[in-house]
Image (cartoon, grey):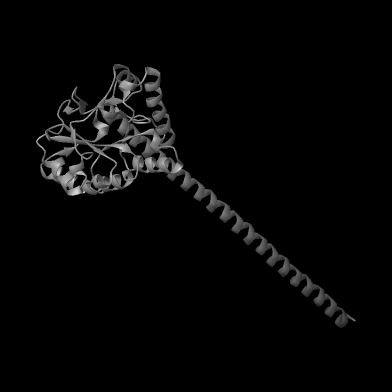
């Protein structure tokens, strides 16, 4: 009988072994899945930490850049004289000129800005509010500002301020400040009255708003004989009015846009450093 009892016992042991192996495999499988999940969670946490560190590093760089810009603005290199020329405060470049463009952003301001950017030439764009009434126009201004160009206030409707009441003048100026701030996130830094016709009230209001008031030294692109890119480039660079600290007035016009590369090159060839508007003194 003992011979007959061995087989069931062996079968039982075999079943236990097989069952044990299966349980062990399942346990190992469960363990592998747990380890895999733990590994994935760990990788996700590490990725999140890396992303957070990168964000913090980027934020730190932006804050440092902003602080640097603020420091530079606190120590201006130039001031605007009574006749609107650019005057060194201390040890600034000895021979400089400032580029400015009025009546923006009409049809060619972005093209002008792109040409200036390519030529590494800073400038101020003075804007009219009636060119900032659509989302597309505001986006154009933002693109110009994002390229690093300063923005100035040139009133809403380009009216002669001598013909307006103080309340009307206030509306002409402050409305543009609001439009510009909505478009680029900050108010204009400069003010230029249409036709150069400031009043005591407009000048004081602009300064109270933190804007540097300026007119210009010379400009030609509104005259019929200079509504040609070659003629305009020649007169802007070779006029006897060009001198140290000259404040050059141009406009958002097709012929001006075409002349910009030659104007910039001509000024640089004559040894002129183009003034960065960020280095010009603001009202205290």
Picture quadrant where residue 206 is located: top left
Residue sitting farthest toward the front? 224
Question: In terms of depth relative to the viewer, which is nearer, 225 or 97?
Answer: 225
Residue sitting farthest toward the right? 1
Question: In terms of depth relative to the viewer, which is nearer, 244 or 55?
Answer: 244
Task: Please tell me which residue is depicted at 44% across the width and 37% down the height of the picture.
Answer: 133
Whether residue 219 appears in this view of the structure is yes
Where residue 227 appears, x then y in whole percent? 22, 44
Which quarter shows the C terminus? top left
Where residue 118 appears, x then y in whole percent? 25, 49
Task: Please tell me which residue is depicted at 37% across the width and 17% down the height of the picture.
Answer: 166
Answer left or right for 220 relative to 207.
left
183 w.r.t. 34: above or below: above
Where residue 183 appears, x then y in whole percent? 42, 37
Question: In terms of depth relative to the viewer, which is nearer, 144 or 199?
Answer: 199
Answer left or right for 65 relative to 119.
right
Task: Please tell me which residue is depicted at 21% across the width and 26% down the height of the picture.
Answer: 80
Which quarter shows the N terminus? bottom right
Picture quadrant where residue 61 is located: top left
Where residue 178 appears, x then y in whole percent? 42, 29
202 w.r.t. 228: above or below: above
Question: In terms of depth relative to the viewer, which is nearer, 67 or 168?
Answer: 168
Whether residue 284 appears in this view of the structure is no
Picture quadrant where residue 147 is located: top left
Answer left or right for 190 relative to 94.
right
Q: How many marks?
A: 0
Answer left or right for 33 relative to 72.
right
């Amino acid at each position: 009988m003992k011979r007959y009892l061995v087989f069931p016992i062996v079968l039982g042991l075999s079943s236990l072994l097989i069952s044990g192996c299966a349980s062990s495999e399942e346990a190992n499988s469960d363990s592998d899945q747990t380890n895999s999940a733990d590994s994935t969670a760990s990788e996700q946490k590490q990725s999140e930490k890396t992303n957070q560190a990168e964000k913090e590093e980027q934020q730190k760089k932006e804050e440092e850049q902003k602080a640097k810009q603020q420091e530079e603005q606190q120590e201006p290199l130039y001031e605007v004289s009574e006749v609107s020329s650019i005057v060194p405060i201390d040890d600034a470049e000895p021979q400089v000129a400032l580029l400015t463009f009025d009546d923006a952003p009409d049809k060619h301001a972005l093209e002008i800005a792109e040409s200036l950017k390519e030529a590494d030439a800073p400038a101020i764009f003075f804007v009219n509010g009636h060119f900032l009434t659509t989302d597309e126009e505001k986006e154009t201004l933002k693109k110009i500002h994002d390229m690093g160009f300063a923005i100035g206030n040139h009133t809403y409707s380009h009216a002669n301020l001598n013909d307006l009441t103080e309340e009307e003048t206030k509306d002409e100026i402050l409305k543009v400040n609001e439009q510009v701030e909505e478009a680029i996130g900050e108010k204009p830094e400069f003010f230029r009255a249409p036709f150069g016709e400031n009043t005591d009230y407009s000048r004081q209001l602009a300064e109270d708003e933190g804007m540097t008031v300026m007119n210009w030294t010379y400009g030609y692109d509104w005259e019929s004989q200079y509504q040609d890119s070659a003629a305009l480039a020649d007169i802007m660079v070779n006029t006897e009015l060009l001198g140290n600290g000259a404040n050059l007035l141009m406009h958002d016009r097709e012929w001006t846009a075409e002349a910009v590369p030659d104007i910039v090159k001509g000024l640089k060839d004559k040894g002129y450093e183009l003034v960065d508007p960020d280095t010009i003194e603001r009202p205290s």
